[in-house]
Amino acid sequence: MLELHPRLILLSLALGACVAAAGCSDTPDAEADELDYELFASTRQLGDVDFAALESSDDAGTLAFGSEPPALAGVEIGQVLLAPASPKTPSGLLRVVTGIERNTTSALVVRTAAAPPQVAFKRLHARVRRAAEPNAPAAGFDVSDTSPLGFGGLLRPLVSVAKGKGEREQSYQIIVFDGDGDVATTNDQIAIDATLGGGFTYDLQVDVDWGAIDELPRVVTECLASLVKIIEGEKPSCAIADLVPEAKTTFRVDPFVTLDVTARGAASLAFEKEIEVGTVNLPPVPLGPLVFVPTVDVVAKIEGGASARFEVGARARANVESSVTISSKSAGSPQYSPPRLESYAVDARPPVVDLHASAKAKVGARLNVSLYGVVGPYATASGVAEISAAPLESPCWRLRFAIEADLGVRITSPRLPIIGYVTLADVRTPPLRPIDEEIASGTCVVPPDEPPKAPGSGPTTKAYQSPPFAPWAKDLGGLVDGAFSETGTFLLGGPTLVPTIDGRWTAAGPFALGVHKIDGDGALTWRSSLARPDGQVLRALRSVSTRDAGLMMLIAPPDVAAFVLAKTGQSGALAWARSYSAPNDCVSTASHLVRDARGYLVLGRCSGGEGWLVRVNERGDVVRARTIREAGAVRVEPIASAVSDGETVIAGQVSRPSELEWTFVTRLDGDDRPTASTAFHCPDRIAMQPTTLIPSDAGGVTVAGTANGPGFVARVRRDGSLGFARFPNLGLGVPADFVVSGVAELPTTGMIVAASTRNVSVGDPPSVVLAGLDSGGAPLWSRRYAIAAPAPRALAIPSLALTDDGGVLVTAIAGPENGREGDLFAMKVHAKDGHLGDGTVLTSTPAAVGDYACVMNERAFTPEVTDVAITSSPIALERR
């Protein structure tokens, strides 16, 4: 489907901007233009003589003249400047004066902002009809900051542009994501290959009429003059939209397109990505003092589910007719003619998909024709392809194709400092599909014993019972602080092993001086640290996959800030980084990052004992921030989070005066407010601290951690009631720590846990234990893994993840050795029994994990949340 999406991308591209190539309607020219206008006397019209004195200008609208030009003699704030296209103003000029500076050398600096045409023209009727050729030799293509997802600071999709035969086709290669930064390896990427030909004709009409009013009303000029106050941080007290007559725009677009597109790739996670591929800058169209600037933006949106492999292609051609009329006084009520499909044909290639292929792509182009960047009609035409597979249905896969079109007009006020543009009108027609049909379907060969699962959803029963791989263990080196494995308490924060869209995993945690990406065979794909310009390396506390096929990392701040977020590509290339600060009275420590349907939630605590929750969106903007406390409690600390049955759940510690530390679990609603909550505790233990949380059946969660000696594993139902709590251990007492830091649900029944353990009385260094538990948390089997050669060495803080081939992938931190701060170890064993075998860098021996019986105490947990101000700002980081 992604393949077709690309096709559609180009289809919509051409649809949104019909290029005058084979098959377009009659080509209009300048002789068909219409122009009738009358300027207000207050409008200052500049010409070549005036621009001869212009020395510089910038995008903010600052015009610097070496001497005062005749047209600007006595110019005042609030007056309107108008100029046709010229060498110094290729797009013309329609601006309102917001500031004036003069000096003794007769130089003049005029600060301006964009103005609507109603403040310059008493009367205006303009109509232009043109054919545009974005694929013609003179049409430039500006790539929108796109490049391979590679190592050298490159992040966004690769777009290769090549002229085709007859200079009337354009070829594109768009790499939506690439897992290792090497675009030559195609098994870890989604890519689009397309060739586009076609054209469009457009007809644009703009009308303004003040009627019997001969002078720009004083209330309007005063409103324009007041805009200068915004520079000082004040908002305007007037609404230009209420003071000027309507600007009426009629826009007709007749697109024609031919395209040949193939989308291919694989994804282990669901994804959704919008791509601004690039812009075709077409020649400006001057009409008297008016200048229309047409551009075509190539755009794409691709989304889908986990699919082991897919390749879909098609060749299509279409001719569409559409139009819209919109007034600035009737926003939201456009008059439009539904798109009419004049002709259409599409041929689908036989797709190559797995039994769980699911993808949808909408790709195309936006045609923008702006008047001075103020009145801007636009048309978007897209091709939409959707492929879906259901292994137990017949047909088991279906391929649909649609053409989607919408039109709109955007009319804006001047571009104002601080608050930007004030939109007078920005309305569009609802998306309409003149064609939407199934173009191909087929049958599948389904294994007779058990249908395969979607990538990343865990092993089938057969793979779990008979794993097809040989277990292994490896020292990956890496960027870690091995001193964490020597502490004995292992409570410096839980590690993470997170699946990525390319079928690999990223390992991070408080021990990590960088993020490590590894594949299923234990090979280190890349490791990446983020550092300040002064060289200070920051710790990567956690990473999660983003919806748009990237990575979001929670970073320990280098200063008194609460936390840092960094967005990277799948190759580790840095996109942006922001630092977030809490109020001064909250000395913050961040602990966790989770992604859910509403964005990202960061958990942490203040030194005074209250916790906090910060919600951010995909761009890193703060949506809301709240502190969390409980009446009578001296400490509420959120530690871990998971998404269960679509709801976000958090777990942490809560304690009251003269009370032991309890574990709490609470669900959050769509506004991040607590709903079902509970707290529980074993009265025999001094404290219970969770380290990890995962979803379980029926909307419940499994929470695990340590109980001051033994570990603990507990099931909390959706309604907040405690299902069970068990305490796996290798013996009780202070010398025997058993800290569970990883847990995974098995495909049959039960679960597997990973823990750090040590026995100070024996003197052995810390080691890692895996244990299989039944559905009630009772131990079934257990094994210990340790570094014995060349000398005993600490190994601790494990994280684990089930693999689709019946294995369990484990990462852990090894202590310092031979001057190294530490190393990242990885192993893959059979999930059914922890089998590793001999001859690896780790030893594997049976372990006698027991269970500690405890009658649990439960109580209602009644958290209270209060809004808190969190500020953010960019932070300069470099990839190392």
Image (cartoon, grey):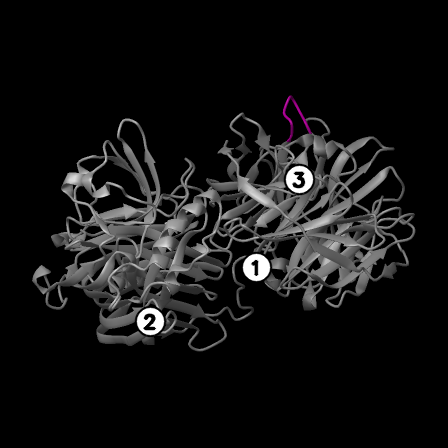
Q: Position of residue 757 (x, y in %)?
A: 78, 40
Residue on which disc 3 sits: 812
Q: Residue at x 66, y 39 (%)?
A: 812
| 3D distance between C-alphas at marks 1 and 2 | 29 Å
In the image, residue 848 sits, relative to residue 217, either above or below, namely above
| Start-end of magenta stretch | 815-822
| Residue 525 - label | none
Outermost residue to the left = 31
Residue on which disc 1 sits: 598
At label 1, which amino acid type do we have?
A: Arg
Task: Give the mark count.
Answer: 3
Discs 3/1, front: 1
Residue on which disc 2 sits: 402
Discs 2/3, front: 2
In the image, residue 216 sits, relative to residue 492, either above or below, namely below
| 3D distance between C-alphas at marks 3 and 1 | 31 Å
At label 3, which amino acid type do we have?
A: Ala
